[in-house]
Image (cartoon, coloured by chain):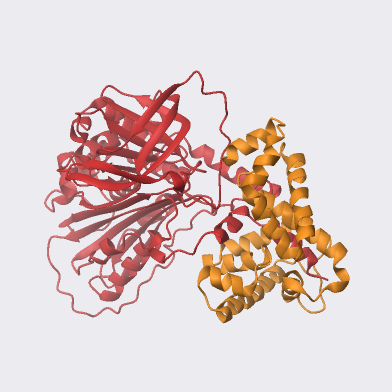
Chain colours: A orange, B red
Amino acid sequence: MDDERIIALYWARNEDAIKETRNKYGRYCYAIAYKILGNDLDAEECESDTYFAAWNSIPPAKPTALSVFLGAITRRLSLDRWRRQYAEKRGHGETALSLCELEECIPAGKSIDEAMEEKELSAAISDFLRKLPQAQASVFVRRYWYFDSVSDIAERYGFGVSKVKMMLKRTRDQLLMKLEKEGFFI
Amino acid sequence: MKSEKLQNAIGGIDPDLIAKSEQPLRKKREHRIVSAIAAMLVLAIGIGILFWNPGYFDDTVYAGDMLAVYPTTVPYAEYLTDPEGYDAWRKDQEKKWEYFGEAENMESFIKVTAAELLSGEGENIVYSPLNVYIALAMLAETTDGDTRKQLLNLLDASDIEVLRKRANTLWNANYNDDGLTSSILASSLWMNEKYSFYKETLEILRDNYYASSYQGNMGSKKFEDALHAWLNEQTRGLLSDQIEELALSQDTILAIATTVYFQANWHDPFSKKNTEKGVFHGTAGDTETDFMHQAYVGSYYQGGNFSAVAKSMKGSGNMWFILPEEGVSVNELLENQEALSFLGKSDTFSNQEAGIDLSVPKFEVSSKLDLKEALKNLGVTDCFDPSRSDFSPLITGEDDIYVGKIDHGALVSIDENGVEATAYTFLPMYGTSSNKITVKFTADRPFLFVITGEDGTVMFIGVVNQM
């Protein structure tokens, strides 16, 4: 079913919206959750929670890209769960690895200004990524939005693993410079 | 960990970036998104006497204080992820509204140029009325007397001040670089450093037409390379084959170059799974090609011997497909005043909403035109004739100046927008089309197209005669 129709079902408060969302995007949401959480049960629960969060958000939301809208919900729910349940076991899996890598985007001895709105930070990162070559931006998104492993990214785009690692390193360095210049750290 | 906030913020980045990461990386040539469109016009003003270049001048290309300052555009932000960014973008876009309203003043120019340029022997032709209009307006600024009068007549302006204001308004109404749509206009002057030009005229061109002036050693490879680099940059390399052939000979006094680069996504993309092979009945015979299909509700116009449907573009205007009735040729349509008027102001015609079942081929058309003969046929003659031309606002003491040639190259290509993974959609209003007519529109024989900007300005017109 087309996304417009699925969204129209949400707006009509027709519960088929959830069924159709599951049919079309269930595997997509599950894959995101699984990459973050690393086990079936948690991933399935986050997938289900995504549908109910979508039901509560549409309306008023009118997503222009339904897949990304749902994926963002799954990502947020899964990360919350990961932080609650796996706090002590960090050091395992792509989620922990990517988190460690992102530490490099924050200068030593500094933190992100807590007063800074998260959406301001999102906008700055979007702005930064838009100005990068497409390949570099997409590699960054695959790694830190989707939590893809470096080898999966290399396979997806036909790059060598070392090239992907180098692109990610360069992008993190550039992002750090941009965020520092724009006063995101204190 | 300190990076958790950063990790959360990455979750809220622009969905477009996420959608793009789903798509395979494309090779450079394929990197155009949906409608990758470019046009350029180079107008070389030469002198009747061929100068011997003693080679005394070095190859420096310089602009001094004659660099135009281009407007800045607030980048587009998704409302869902960045409502404040979205508001800032929207307010910035609304500022452009003060420039809307001039588009329809180009109608008479479009009617005569479309009839003159698009009638042909069956080849594909495309040109940008907006691009040509601005270049000719700049040319008018450098002329006086009858030379200028002929240009004002063609451009349908009572005097140079009216034309200047109109060109500036059209320029600003159609300039947009917000990341959602690229509609980038640019102008430049390439001046022979052996001559002195009136600064006042150059300033008018800089301040009203955003034209940067570059001076250098005309005839040198370096100066020509600089022109090619500028044109390629402005047209994103889409017309590099044509640009390579453009020469700045040593007898050139000045060249005017103007460009338009336009790229936009369909508001409602075609689904790739609906694209299938079909036969296009072109003027050179039948060709099997990919046809895109979509059913939607949109603008429709039924003319005396043609019909037209619009497909809207995100953050911009429309692309109109204009199909002559069976048995009517494109050339016949170009003699029809109603059809020509429609080309001149498609967006503001008395169009109606209809259910449209559209089938249109994926295509890329490009052409290179020398506009000199066409303009002569339209009454612009003196600027090409060294014995009659008047370039007094440009330069003093030189009587034999004339326009040698006017090259206009343009390219338009359309496809589905590769949207399978991105799923950019808009919400159709179900249930509202039941009382509308339904139109089956299959462009499987020669047709015309028009691409309009947000204010209705006709940016590109073309004829597709063969695949």
Residue at point 52% right, 69% down?
A157
The residue closer to the viewer here, B322 or B357, is B357
For this orientation, the residue located farthest to the front is A40
Residue at point 56% right, 67% down?
A132
As drawn, B352 above or below B253: above
As drawn, B21 above or below B226: above
**Residue B175: x %, y % from top left:** 47, 48
Residue A165 falls left or right of residue A101:
left
The residue closer to the viewer here, B213 or B119, is B119
The quadrant where residue A155 appears: bottom right
**Residue A45: x %, y % from top left:** 79, 53
Quarter of the figure with the C terminus of chain A:
bottom right
The quadrant where residue A33 appears: bottom right
Residue B85 visible in the current orientation? no
Residue at point 30% right, 29% down?
B341
As drawn, B325 above or below B445: above
As drawn, B242 above or below A63: below
The residue closer to the viewer here, B272 or B160, is B272
